[in-house]
Structure formats: structure tokens, C-alpha cells
Image (cartoon, helix red, strand yellow):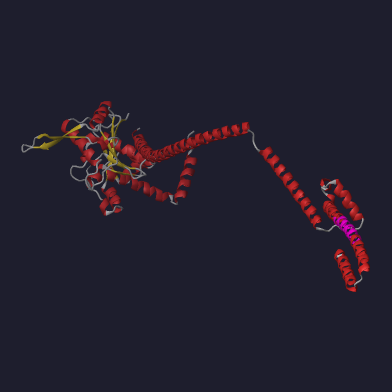
């Protein structure tokens, strides 16, 4: 901006001199203008250099701020030269809020996320590794499963056999109960017969007692 | 240890008190029982009449003879055979009138007042029945009895009349046959078959007796009758022809249900 103003000022001076019509003076003035232009260019170069320095300091301050965000976490990962330059820029009064700050911050955040993710993944991997059974264990587990399946099949077979046995036993029990009921009936019948026989015996005894009348 | 007269008297008084009877009432009952006994049997002996009053009382028969209620008659075989009475007693006119005064119409019997009509050949036989009856009655083994005279009054043709019918407390009827001489041939067959019919249910007619007891003093008669009453034993049924001669009409078997219903026992 400043450069453009200076260029516009030189052009306006040269034009005024041309319009005045002085030959010698014109050349003299031309020389002065050229000197002025050279001086302006020098100043312009200086301004550019300063501007470059300013921008660099600003970038360094931004990067530094970005690196020092989150309490300085992972600040060691930032190049030392950048950190020294950035710190100096901050101390010189630069705020360091440019897009570099966000870039560094994002990079740092990304690094944190990546590190955290890696840590989580590592932990997960380690945990999976820890819980993952070994080949022998798998073999043993397979054998155990096979054995368990065999045992289950055997148990099912035994259960079926037991059910069959239970059914047979139930049948036997039912039959035994029927026999028992039949026996109870027979016992009742025999008791009835016995009672009848006892009654007959008692009657016969009493009848025989009548022979006592003849004694 | 024998009881004294005072003790016996005290016992009898206690018994009367328990029965709610006076001595006079009891005396009348004993007289009636003795007279009724002769009325039912037709005759009796003094010792049996004395037995009707109980073992502790004697002399009732003589008292009744003196009172003119009984007639005493000497027996033909008296004092010769030990188990035959020397005298028998029958009811006099007064005795018969006294008994019949207390009888119901259906209980009346045709009583023979003539003592000489008593069958002397059956004295021992009949006296055995009377002695056994009064003994069983006094000792509570039977509650009631029917004499041949009572049974004959209500008998049906062809139905066996036992020498005495005893009825015990349960109402069982036991026919008693006293067999002192063996029967043979047709008489034995008729005897066996009439007892079988009396112990059997014939149509609607219930058995006349629940058991038959044959009593004898001979082992041979016991064996003979036991064989005759064995189920399956053959019994001849006899029939009289036009010339009044008996001949075997058919043969029948002693049925199975007779088993155990006929008892043959020997007495001493």
C-alpha cells in the first residue's frame, strides 16, 4: 500500500516537471526523479524485507502458539528453530493468531487423536492378544468341545435310555400296583373266607360244646 | 370248699333280689317249668325233674307227686340196669290241667295220660336226650329246644324228626340224633337221606336244621355213619311195589354241601 503511494507520488512529480518545460532543469529533475525512484525502490525492497520478516515472525508466533496449545502437550514434536523463533516473536509482541496457529493446533489435535487412537488400539490389541487363546488352548478347547459334545451325545443317549428305563419302570410299577390291587382284593377275599371259616369253626366249636350235655 | 346253707340262702336271696322276684314266685316258676318239661317230653325221671330246679335243690319231683300233680310209675328194667331209671313220672289230670291252663292254643299237645303207653324200650335213649338238654339249657349252651312230640305235631311227611332240636343263642338249629343201635339197609338209607334233605334247601324251603349231631356210644356206629354221610357216598332210594315189597328205585349221592354239617360223636 505504502509502495503504491510512493510510486504515485513520483509519477505526479515527473508529470509536473514535464508540464513546466524546462530542458536543463528537466534533465536535472529527471536525474533527481531517477534517484528518487532508486531510493524509492530501495525503500521498497526494505519495506518488502521488513514485511517478509513481519510475516515470518507472525507465522512463527502462530506456530509457536499452536505448538504450546493444550498446555504444551507434544510441544517437543515442533522443530526447535521454529519454537525459538516463535517464542521470540511472541516476546516481541506478536499475538500469533494466524491460520498457522490453527494448522499447528489441528496437527497437534490430530496427533493427539492419532496417539490416543493408537494407544487405544494398542491397548485393545494387547487386550485381544491377552485374551486370545493360544493354539494349544484352542486345540484343547476344541478337544474339550468335542469331548463335551460326545459327552452330551452320550448323556442324551443315557437320558433316552433312562427315559426308556423310567417308562419301563413306570410300567412295572403300574403293573405291580395292579398286581398289588389284585393281591389286596385276594387278601380281602381270603380275609372274608378266613372270617367265614373262623365263624364256621366257632359255630362248630359251639356245636361241639353241646356234647358236654352228654357227659 | 362246700358252701354252707346260710351262704347258699344268701346267694339265692341276692339272685331273687336281682331278678325282682319273690321266693314264692320263683317256686311257682320252678313247678311250672318241671310240669311243662314232662308235658313237652311226655314223661321224665325224678332225677331229671330235680335237675330242672338247679343242682342245689332236690326233692321237687317227690313234692309234685305228693301234691298229686305227677304220677310215679315203676319201669320194667328199673334197678337192673344202672343207667335206666327205676321210676318214671308223668302228668296227672291235675298236672295236665295246670300246664294247659298256661299254654297258648298253638302250643297244645296231645298228652297221653296213661303211663303204660310210654315205650319202655326207648327209656335210656330218651333219658339221654332229656339229660343233655337240661344240662345244656342250665349251662347256657342252648336257649331253646324242641322235643320229638313238639316236632311231630308240626312235621311234614318224609321229613326227619330228630330226637331233640337244640336252638342256641345265635338261633342256630342243631338236630340231635341219639343212635344206640346200628341201622342197616333200607333204614340206614332212609335215615341218611332224610337228614340230607333236612339239611338242604329245597326250592323255597330253607334247611330245617343248621347242623345234625349224631351221638352214639359205639365207635363202630361212628365209623359207619361218618362213611355214610361222606359227600359222594351212595345212598339207595327205596320204593314199595304193589306187593308191599321194598326194592331199590335209584341211587343218589350225598351232596357236597353236607360236608361238615353232620357230626358223628361217641359219648361215654
Above or below for B219 versus B31: above
Residue range corresponding to the magenta coloring: A39-55
Q: Position of residue B51 (x, y in %)?
A: 36, 39
Q: Residue furthest left?
A: B243
Q: Residue furthest top?
A: B220
Front residue of this view, candidates B94 and B154 = B154
Q: Quadrant of the C terminus of chain A?
A: top left
Residue B74 appears in the figure: no
* Residue A93 lies in quadrant: bottom right
Residue A47 highlighted magenta (yes or no): yes
Q: Position of residue B144 (x, y in %)?
A: 33, 45
Front residue of this view, candidates A159 and B78 = A159
Front residue of this view, candidates B258 and A180 = A180
Residue A147 appears in the figure: yes
Q: Residue furthest front?
A: A23
Q: Quadrant of the N terminus of chain A?
A: bottom right
Front residue of this view, candidates A39 and A2 = A39
Above or below for A63 versus A189: below
Q: Position of residue B104 (x, y in %)?
A: 28, 54
Judged by its main secondary structure, the magenta piece is helix
Residue A181 highlighted magenta (yes or no): no
The number of discs equals 0
Q: Position of residue A64 (x, y in %)?
A: 85, 52
The answer to whether A142 appears left or right of A171 in the picture is: right
Amino acid at each position: 500500500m505504502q509502495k503504491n503511494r510512493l510510486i504515485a507520488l513520483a509519477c505526479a512529480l515527473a508529470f509536473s516537471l514535464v508540464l513546466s518545460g524546462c530542458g536543463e532543469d528537466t534533465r536535472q529533475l529527471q536525474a533527481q526523479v531517477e534517484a528518487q525512484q532508486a531510493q524509492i525502490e530501495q525503500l521498497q525492497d526494505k519495506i518488502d524485507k521488513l514485511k517478509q520478516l513481519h510475516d515470518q515472525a507472525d507465522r512463527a508466533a502462530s506456530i509457536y502458539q499452536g505448538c504450546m496449545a493444550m498446555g504444551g502437550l507434544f510441544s517437543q514434536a515442533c522443530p526447535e528453530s521454529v519454537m525459538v523463533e516463535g517464542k521470540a516473536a511472541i516476546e516481541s509482541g506478536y499475538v500469533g493468531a494466524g491460520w498457522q496457529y490453527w494448522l499447528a493446533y489441528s496437527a497437534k489435535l490430530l496427533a493427539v487423536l492419532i496417539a490416543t487412537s493408537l494407544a487405544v488400539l494398542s491397548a485393545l490389541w494387547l487386550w485381544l492378544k491377552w485374551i486370545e487363546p493360544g493354539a494349544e488352548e484352542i486345540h484343547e478347547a476344541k478337544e474339550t468341545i468335542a469331548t463335551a459334545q460326545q459327552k452330551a451325545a452320550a448323556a442324551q443317549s443315557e437320558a433316552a435310555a433312562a427315559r426308556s428305563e423310567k417308562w419301563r419302570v413306570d410300567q412295572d410299577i403300574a403293573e405291580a400296583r395292579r398286581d398289588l390291587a389284585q393281591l389286596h382284593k385276594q387278601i380281602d377275599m381270603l380275609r372274608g373266607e378266613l372270617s367265614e371259616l373262623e365263624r364256621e369253626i366257632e359255630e362248630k366249636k359251639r356245636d361241639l360244646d353241646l356234647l358236654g350235655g352228654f357227659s | 370248699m362246700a358252701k354252707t346253707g346260710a351262704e347258699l340262702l344268701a346267694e339265692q336271696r341276692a339272685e331273687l333280689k336281682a331278678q325282682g322276684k319273690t321266693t314264692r314266685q320263683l317256686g311257682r316258676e320252678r313247678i311250672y317249668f318241671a310240669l311243662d318239661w314232662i308235658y313237652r317230653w311226655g314223661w321224665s325221671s325224678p332225677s331229671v325233674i330235680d335237675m330242672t330246679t338247679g343242682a342245689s335243690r332236690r326233692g321237687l319231683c317227690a313234692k309234685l307227686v305228693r301234691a298229686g300233680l305227677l304220677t310215679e310209675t315203676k319201669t320194667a328194667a328199673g334197678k337192673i340196669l344202672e343207667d335206666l331209671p327205676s321210676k318214671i313220672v308223668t302228668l296227672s289230670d291235675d298236672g295236665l290241667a295246670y300246664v294247659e291252663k298256661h299254654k297258648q292254643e298253638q302250643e297244645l299237645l296231645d298228652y297221653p295220660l296213661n303211663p303204660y303207653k310210654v315205650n319202655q324200650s326207648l327209656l335210656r335213649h330218651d333219658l339221654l336226650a332229656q339229660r343233655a338238654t337240661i344240662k345244656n339249657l342250665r349251662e347256657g349252651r342252648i336257649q331253646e329246644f324242641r322235643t320229638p312230640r313238639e316236632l311231630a305235631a308240626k312235621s311234614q311227611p318224609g321229613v326227619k324228626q330228630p330226637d331233640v332240636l337244640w336252638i342256641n343263642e345265635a338261633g342256630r338249629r342243631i338236630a340231635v340224633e341219639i343212635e344206640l343201635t346200628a341201622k342197616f339197609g333200607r333204614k340206614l338209607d332212609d335215615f341218611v337221606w332224610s337228614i340230607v334233605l333236612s339239611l338242604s334247601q329245597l326250592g323255597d324251603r330253607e334247611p330245617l336244621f343248621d347242623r345234625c349231631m349224631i351221638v352214639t356210644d359205639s365207635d363202630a356206629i361212628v365209623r359207619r355213619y361218618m362213611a355214610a354221610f361222606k359227600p359222594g357216598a351212595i345212598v339207595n332210594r327205596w320204593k314199595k311195589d304193589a306187593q308191599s315189597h321194598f326194592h331199590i328205585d335209584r341211587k343218589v349221592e350225598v351232596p357236597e354241601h353236607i360236608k361238615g354239617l353232620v357230626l358223628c360223636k361217641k359219648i361215654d
